[in-house]
Amino acid sequence: MTADPLLAKLTAATKGLLYPSESDAPLTPFVWEAGPNTAAAARRHAGLPAKARGKASSAADFFEGVADVDGFPALQAALGELLSDVTVYRFGAANVSLVVVGTAADGRRAGFTTTAVET
Amino acid sequence: MRTRLALALGLLLAAGAAGHAADLDLALGNPSRATADPDKKTNYLDLKKHFALSYNNDTGTPNWVSWHLAKTDLGEAPRKSKFTTDAALPAGFHRVTHNDYTGSGFDRGHMCPHGDRAADKEMSYSTFLMTNIVPQSNENNSGAWNQLELYGRHLVETKGKELFIVAGPHGVGGEGREGAAKSLANGRVTVPKVTWKVIAVLDAGAGDPVKRVDAKTRLIAVVMPNDRTVPKNNWWKYRVSVKAVEELTGYTFFDKVPAAVIDPLKKVADGEYIPVLERERDRE
């Protein structure tokens, strides 16, 4: 389906998973070119409005919240093998955009985006 | 005799130590005279530690949830991602699950919101019980409904108030992301036509709240459509009188307060000017 082995692995790891919140949202994997792992870069790559302010948090916090959800512990393990310095950027309030991004061995940034409804 | 006195004292102390729910969450009244009788499956009183509710096994939702909001309830405790099936419902009740809402196009809408019980993780997580949840359109849940929740916390956080809040669903049939629906989960969960909320705003203080309600007490009530027309803000446009919510639902609110005091207050819709809060601007 996809020629990029990194994207193929991320696609397999996120397939069928829904991020639970007040709604449930699919996970969209991505691979970006090498660059700094910042909120501004995540916002730009994810196509979010320029005025959206991002808040960074750790992957550990993100996965702790879904430790009881089938598939997420396995996803955490897969990300741990593929990426380092995994960071979660949150944009917006109530309808929140999430960008989970780390750095691959070849320097490219990769991860997945999803959304959460948090009121 | 002495044993009996000791027993009575012990019970009193135990009741006091039970904490939040029993003493304040229903302090101004029980809107549908719900009882903890498991045979009354459509009006079953469930006194949770951090809020009280009347559960309706036919609709798979609460009829109403009632709670007291004070500054000590606020904080930054984490949210729970996946909602919890309420295993405390008596045998014979259907237990609604997180997955019953998945793909329905409706949000799992808290009645008692996470933000009103965010002082610690245990109380935060308790709001993610499915018995505290109704199917809300995303526009209602994350829009004006959420703005009213933020406004209530603003009153508590910065205006020296404490709130007595009751909220619930009413009617059948809403419209969500996947279109109009009357129910979810093969009819186990009713999609309401509207959501309503009533709030008694008191100056934060000690002593019996019933006695602190007077002719100047502010009451706020809203009825919001459970559809896609609800805007992100301007919750105040949905204000009605408490009496209008009583006529809609058949419930009686704040009836521990003497009628001579509360009835005149119920007849008037709140008309206070509502400021745009900083947190609302942040989300634009």
Image (cartoon, coloured by chain):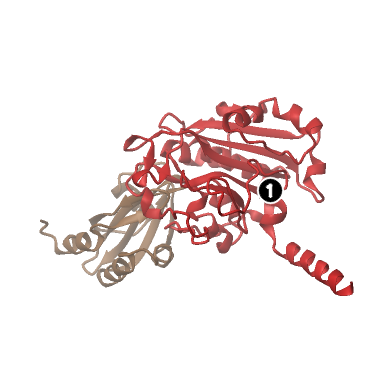
Q: In this view, does B99 lie to the left or right of B165?
A: left
Q: Which residue is drawn at 84% across and 70% down?
A: B4
| Residue B60 pos. (x, y %) | 46, 47
Which residue was labeled with disc 1? B26
Tell me: residue B257, above or below residue B225: below
Residue B135 occupies quadrant: top left
Please rate how many residues cluster around mark 1, counting C-alpha atoms within 10 Å: few if below 14, some from 14 to 19, many from 20.
many
| Residue B274 pos. (x, y %) | 62, 31
Q: Residue at x 37, y 62 (%)?
A: A87
In the rendered image, the quadrant that contains the N terminus of chain B is bottom right
A110 or B160: which is nearer to us?
A: B160
Q: Residue at x 32, y 68 (%)?
A: A76
| Residue B142 pos. (x, y %) | 46, 41
Residue B14 seen in the current view: yes
Q: What residue type is labelled 1?
A: Leu
Tell me: residue A24, above or below residue B280: below
Say which colour chain A has: brown
Chain in red, by letter, is: B
| Residue B284 pos. (x, y %) | 46, 37
Q: Is residue B180 left or right of residue B230?
A: left
